[in-house]
Image: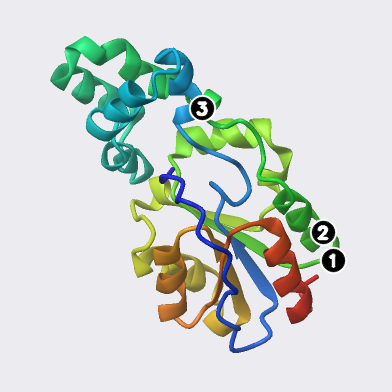
Amino acid sequence: MTAPDAVPSAQPSAQPSARPSIVVFDIGQVLIQWDPRHLYRDLFDGDEDLMEDFLANVCTMDWNLEQDRGRSWEEAVALLAAEHPYCSELIRAYHERWEEMVPGPVEGTPEILMELKRRGRTVYAITNFSVEKLELSRKRFDFLTLFDDVVVSGEVKLIKPDPAIFRVLLDRHGLDPSDTYFIDDSPANVEAARSLGMNAHHFTGAGPLRAEMEALGLL
């Protein structure tokens, strides 16, 4: 799963060019929270400087992204532990205690997903996620089983914002991009979706999302 973006000042999303009927969610930081700091603050006894140095130079976001791209966690841990043997236990914790990085759902958005399903909407997801960790999350959060289909980066070996991962969903289901409404917390991913003609919302919270979806008639 990709890094949590810093929350920007609230700005309205670009007004969609159509009234789409199909909703496409990101998962991390939109439906469930994720941040390795939830785990490593405990492991570093609250020493923020040591924790940030470790996350910037050992278990980096680039290293984590390769698991999103499909590399196995066992291989990832072995490679990094060989490079940083003095940190081997901390590195293993990233894999073995991964669920502690996910404190819970993002407030308000699972309810939006469930409401869409009750209304009979077709709802998909495109997510940068390892297959293994997504399965753990599905067991923990029932609402992650509600999608009509999920394109998982670790399965298709593509990661957002590569337009190719969006095309996987569009081609798999014969979707008209203008009939889709994509939600993501990453501005780069939002722009990639828009470049393909999808309507897209830069997620900053459930309130602005719900307001825009109500304006479009999705809710």
Q: Quadrant of the N terminus?
A: top left
Q: Quadrant of the C terminus?
A: bottom right
**Residue sitting farthest toward the bottom:** 17
Mark 2 or mark 3: which is in front?
Answer: 3
Whether pointer 1 and pointer 3 mark residues with C-beta atoms closer than 8 Å, the reply is no
Residue 37 locus on image (x, y percent): 45, 29
List the residue tagged with mark 2.
Answer: 115
Three-letter amino acid code of the residue under disc 2: Glu
- State left or right for residue 27 relative to residue 161: right
Dot placed on the residue nearer the N-terminal end, 1 or 3: 3
Q: Dot 2: within a 10 Å radius of its alpha carbon, few (fewer than 14), some, or many (20 or more) residues?
A: some
Q: CA distance from mark 1 to mark 2?
A: 6 Å
Q: Residue at x 54, y 26 (%)?
A: 99
Element marked by disc 3: helix
Per the rendering, the mark at residue 38 is 3
Q: Dot 1: within a 10 Å radius of its alpha carbon, few (fewer than 14), some, or many (20 or more) residues?
A: few
Q: Residue at x 31, y 21 (%)?
A: 50
List the residue tagged with mark 1.
Answer: 119
Three-letter amino acid code of the residue under disc 1: Arg
Three-letter amino acid code of the residue under disc 3: His
